[in-house]
Image: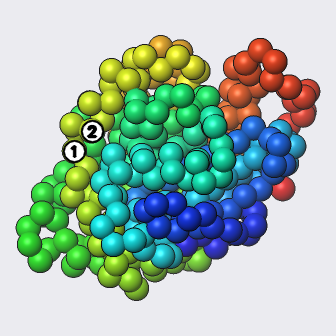
Amino acid sequence: MSCSERLGARRHVTIPQGRIELRERGPQDGIPLVFVHGGLANGDLWRDVVPPLAQTGRYRCITPDWPLGSHAEPLRAGADVTPPGQAEIVVAVLDALDLDRVVLVANDAGGAISQLVLARHPDRVDRVVLTSCDNHRAFPPRYLKPVRWLTIVPGLAHPIARLFGWGPVRRIFFWSVASRPLPPEITSSYLDPMRRSRAVRDELVRFFRDVRPAHTTGALPGLRRFPRPALVVWGGQDWWFSRGGGRRLAATLPDARFLVLDGARTFVPEDAPAELARLVDGFLRETAPDGEDVPAAPTAVPTG
């Protein structure tokens, strides 16, 4: 589970599927931003993005640990953790927090989950920021497609998942998704829950086994009808998701802009957190709906 106190106070909500741990920072009456990470990550992914946004005094930053392998507590037995099920978990958390409409900020598989939320529950999303993520037929990304097929073989899924805790595999994986070395405490927060708990690992396996292009391509009609602004930010050095896929994703959304952050890989919030925070803040100020109170932008988004 996330360990960074910079994300704010830890709390939890109980939803029909189980208990979700989260952290909050920023004013309770601020614009609600809900952050959605992907597999083998948790709220710590956003530890350097949330503080500058919260410190503007404009945003209520909500950073859950979604049940994608790096969460502390498994859900209730039988909970649906497939990609469509994860989208319903996001909506259930919004219900538990009594949030009508939010801004989703997503990365990696969290981007695919957010696309399903947009397609199935467009009324719950005010605006959306998608950073390097699964899209169209890239679900899972190209290099993980063989691994997904292997996890379907009886008896192989759990050993493959546990391999990510082995030193060489761990280093190669995180090197491939982040150009900056991750602190040991962060890699531990990402990997230890899955390594220690078979139930947590099983939820990751069940999610990954159901990752398939039918989900993301099935969401496309809904994305084409999404009526509110979107920002798509891609890592300029992303090896997992092609820049062309990011451009197609932005072109699918009727009111979207596409930007590239040079030097960032798939984990854009790890590689370019200050730049991403500035882009999110600028995007939300520029697209503020009529009647939304927009305080003057600071000279620079604070980074402390």
* Residue at horizontal 90 percent and vertical 34 percent from the top: 298
Between 100 and 144, which is closer to the camera in this rendering? 100
Front-lying residue, 127 or 250: 127
The answer to whether 138 appears left or right of 21 in the picture is left
Percent x, y of residue 247: 41, 23
Q: Quadrant of residue 219?
A: top left
Amino acid type, residue under disc 2 in the picture: His
| Coordinates of residue 124 in the picture (x, y in percent) | 56, 34
Q: Secondary structure at mark 1?
A: loop
Which of the numbered marks, if any, corresponds to residue 188?
none
For residue 111, side relative to residue 172 (left or right): right
Q: Which mark is residue 215?
A: 2
The location of residue 232, given as percent across then percent down, is 52, 30
Which residue is at the front of the view, 97 or 110?
97
Q: Is residue 207 above or below residue 171?
A: above
Q: Amino acid at mark 1?
A: Arg
Residue at 81%, 18% (x, y): give it. Answer: 291
Contact check, label 2 and label 1, Cβ < 8 Å = yes
What's the distance in space between the residues labelled 2 and 1, CA to CA? 6 Å
Q: Which residue is mark 1?
A: 212
Would residue 74 be seen by someone viewing this image from the given angle?
A: yes
Q: Quadrant of the N terminus?
A: bottom right
Q: Residues within 10 Å of mark 1 (few under 14, many from 20)?
A: some
